[in-house]
Amino acid sequence: MKSGTVAVVGRANAGKSTLINVLVGEKVAIVSPKPQTTRDRILGVLTTNNYQIVFEDTPGFYKARTELNKKMQKTARQTAKDVDVVLFVMDCHSGVSDEDLDLLKSVIGNAPVIVAMSKIDIMQKENIPLALTKIAEIDGVSEIIPISARKGRNVKELTNLIVNYLPTGSEIFDKNVVSDKSEKFMIAEIMREKILLKFDKEIPHGVAIVINEFELNDSGVYEINLDIICEKQNHKSILIGKQGAKIKEVSSFARESMEKFLGKKVFLTTFVKVKEGWRDKESLLQSYGYGKTDEFI
């Protein structure tokens, strides 16, 4: 049997989380069109009779401006150093930039590096050979494969490439484990995902979710009480909306996904609170769970 760890790295919004969800076959990471959606290292585990791949989803590379951003960048770069394979996801649909190539060079080390050219379903076909040529000129790249996670193109082929580079060994996790994150963690992430999707550019990334209550009652319904933390009073007003219309809408949106994820009915209560500059305050970052480990689901 083959088993090993794979760091999934690349620029922000390159499609890393979408790809991991498709590869694992389960929702283990939230997805939105915005960069900085993934904030922490999240494991997604794919196990078959012949292999186990532990994918490590990481925050995208970008310029860090807050303490939270710095933590995210440190997580991404450290993860790339401690794995059996590096999977560099590169959004090539608009071409390959010098910045893309510089980031690729920065993760080349002792581990094999596989470059997945993502989003080829929206890339002009005549541009694919040029992108392949530019990437192939980088020393240390082991494999290059064009993919589309959303369309399922070359996903199985990518999995086979990864398995070829894994060491022989026993399973790292129990075969029933699909993520290192708890249900409670994923509920918070689902709420944050829906806020990012619903509010588009109105609300920046200064939103955190704190779960106050997560209990399965005697009727088989999950009672979930959570706080939505934002950085400014006007952000709170936007989140709540006129007569609470916005918060009701996004909460209903989130509750449907929570019920699908948990497989049970959910009674959801949400509150919006302001904590100015929380992304630069170490004590708040710790209290909101950034940097902590989580249990298995």
Image: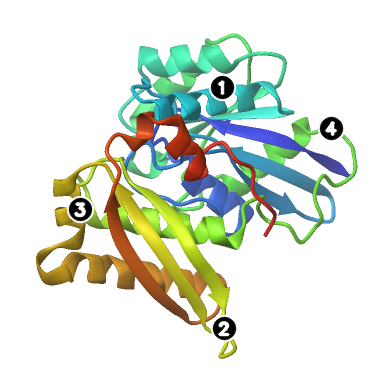
Separation (CA) of disc 4 from disc 3:
50 Å
Q: Are marks 4 and 2 in contact (CB under 8 Å)?
A: no
Estimate the spatial distance between the alpha carbons at disc 4 and disc 1, rounded to whole Å: 22 Å
Helix, strand or loop under label 3: helix
Upstream in sequence: badge 4 or badge 3: 4
Q: Nearer the viewer, residue 283 or 228?
A: 283
Label 2 vs label 1, nearer the camera: 2
Return the residue at label 2. Answer: 217
Q: Residue at x 33, y 50 (%)?
A: 229
Q: Amino acid at mark 2?
A: Asn
**Please, what secondary structure does the residue beneath circle 2 have?**
loop
- The residue wearing badge 3 is 236
In the figure, residue 94 lies in which quadrant?
A: top left
Q: Which residue is mark 4?
A: 167
Labelled disc at residue 77: 1
Q: Earlier in the sequence, mark 2 or mark 3?
A: 2
